[in-house]
Amino acid sequence: MRALILICSMFFVTLAQASFYQAGDQVTPIQLDDQFEKSVVVDANTDVILFSRGMAGGDLIKEALDKQISADKAVPATQVYLADISGMPSLIAKFVAIPQMKDLPFSIGLDKEGEVTKLLPAEKDRASLIRLDNLKVIEVSHFDSGEELFKALR
């Protein structure tokens, strides 16, 4: 019985460690609707995914993208911002958050159920930057500063 418990616990530890994409992994193409109900796609042409699971990480990404737009006048087409908003109450998302997102000068792919982005790496209150080459993860970085994220995007 102890051996079975040990084997099961080792299995779950392995699953927990392998639960997010990391360098060397191949990302499955992603398609989500943005705040305007237009398609946002992660495909072989995407070289950067910006990702957040919470408001704090989202605020950091917004800060970095605002700076990027001020400096470069646009967000590159090869850069995609995705957000898991599944933790947000649906009424708040529908009547408050998404309407506010429509004022932003960039698109956010919204995962309302949390399923599509469940393998994307994230840390609490931080923004994730995932660099890709033909859907292969090259690097994963997490930021707690919009300025540092902006510098990493340059």
Image (cartoon, rainbow, N blue to C red):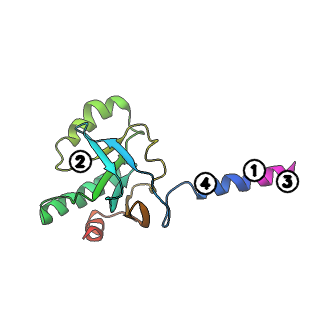
| Badge 1 or badge 4: first in the primary sequence | 1
The crowd level at tag 4 (other Cα within 10 Å; few <14, some 14-19, many 20+) is: few
Pinpoint residue 37: horizontal percent, then vertical percent: 25, 36
Separation of marks 1 and 4 at Cα, in angstroms: 12 Å
Mark 3: amino acid: Ala
Mark 4: amino acid: Ala
Residue span colored magenta:
1-7
Q: Which residue is mark 3?
A: 3
Separation of marks 2 and 1 at Cα, in angstroms: 42 Å
| Badge 2 or badge 1: first in the primary sequence | 1
Q: Are marks 2 and 1 in contact (CB under 8 Å)?
A: no
**Would you say residue 55 is visible in this rendering?**
no
Q: Which residue lies at the image location 32% right of the left edge and 48% below the top edge?
A: 41
Q: Which residue lies at the image location 32% right of the left edge and 58% below the top edge?
A: 46
Secondary element at image label 3: helix
Pinpoint residue 134: horizontal percent, then vertical percent: 38, 62
Mark 1: amino acid: Cys
Q: Which residue is mark 4?
A: 16
Separation of marks 2 and 4 at Cα, in angstroms: 31 Å
Secondary element at image label 1: helix
Secondary element at image label 4: helix
Compared to 118, does 61 lie above or below?
below
The verdict on residue 6 being magenta is yes
Q: Which residue is mark 1?
A: 8
Separation of marks 1 and 3 at Cα, in angstroms: 9 Å
Secondary element at image label 2: loop
